[in-house]
Image (cartoon, grey):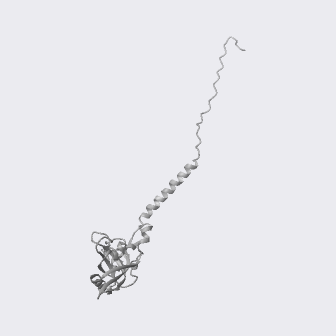
Amino acid sequence: MIDLDTPTPPLTVSPPARASARPLHRRRALPGGRAVAGGLLVAVAGVGVFAAYESADDGPTSAYVVVTADVDAGDTLSGDDLALVALDLPGAQRRLSFTDVGVLSRATALGPLEAGQLVQSSDVARSHGGPGLASISIPVEPARALNGELLRGDRVDVIVTTTAGGTPETETVSMAALVVDASSGDAALGGSGEVTVELAVPPEDLEAVAQAGAAGTVTLARTTAVRQ
């Protein structure tokens, strides 16, 4: 039997349980085309640097001819004067240099060379197996030495004119002589006064050239210019 006088306790209702909060993560975007290209460039550059570093210890791959001792203008080179040295040269210098000592054997130096100096085509004239050359200097009037247009390495015929009994006589005393140097004191070739021309000639022509310079009027006729 229900007791109507007894109060009924209030009904207690619990609030619904909250769902645990789930963290939200932002989706990472894929790298763009520029980023990919940049990464590739960095990787390629790194490989190039590594390859250069690895090859740095390899040293030069080519060797070129140098002189092993001081050489004077007009000297004939021999194998004892030359050696191969490993060098890296730009293309322009490679074309003017020598890789074979034998090619320069018996070549004539057109100017002074210092020990260790690289030999280039403008420094020498090759005799192509002919006899050795001897150096001699003779005085020449500028007008008879192409008026200052002679260059080291030019080939000239030495012509002498003498007067005997009032009649001039002309004779070629040396052919294809090599011009080693030319000067007229402080003045350049072609200045006033006589020019002193240093020639490299076969030994058998020495006396005739010396006599021409002392007793006659010398004319130098350029025949060919040595251009290696």
Q: Where is 70 relative to 30, above or below? A: below
At horizontal 45% and vertical 61% (from top left) the residue drawn is 52
- Residue placed furthest toward the top: 5
At horizontal 42% and vertical 71% (from top left) the residue drawn is 96
Q: Is residue 138 left or right of residue 44?
A: left
At horizontal 28% and vertical 84% (from top left) the residue drawn is 211
Q: Position of residue 183 (x, y in %)?
A: 30, 72
Q: Is residue 7 left or right of residue 184?
A: right
Q: Where is 224 relative to 2, above or below? A: below
Res 61 visible: no
Q: Where is 19 relative to 160, above or below? A: above
Q: Is residue 4 left or right of residue 76?
A: right
At horizontal 49% and vertical 56% (from top left) the residue drawn is 45
Q: Can you tell which quarter of the image residue 78 is in?
A: bottom left
Q: Can you tell which quarter of the image residue 216 is in?
A: bottom left
**Camera-nearest residue between 142 and 156:** 142
**Camera-nearest residue between 129 and 11:** 129
Q: How many marks?
A: 0
Res 122 visible: yes
- Residue placed furthest toward the front: 166
Q: Position of residue 184 (x, y in %)?
A: 29, 72
- Residue placed furthest toward the bottom: 165
Q: Position of residue 38 (x, y in %)?
A: 53, 51
- Quadrant holding the C terminus: bottom left
Q: Position of residue 1 (x, y in %)?
A: 72, 15
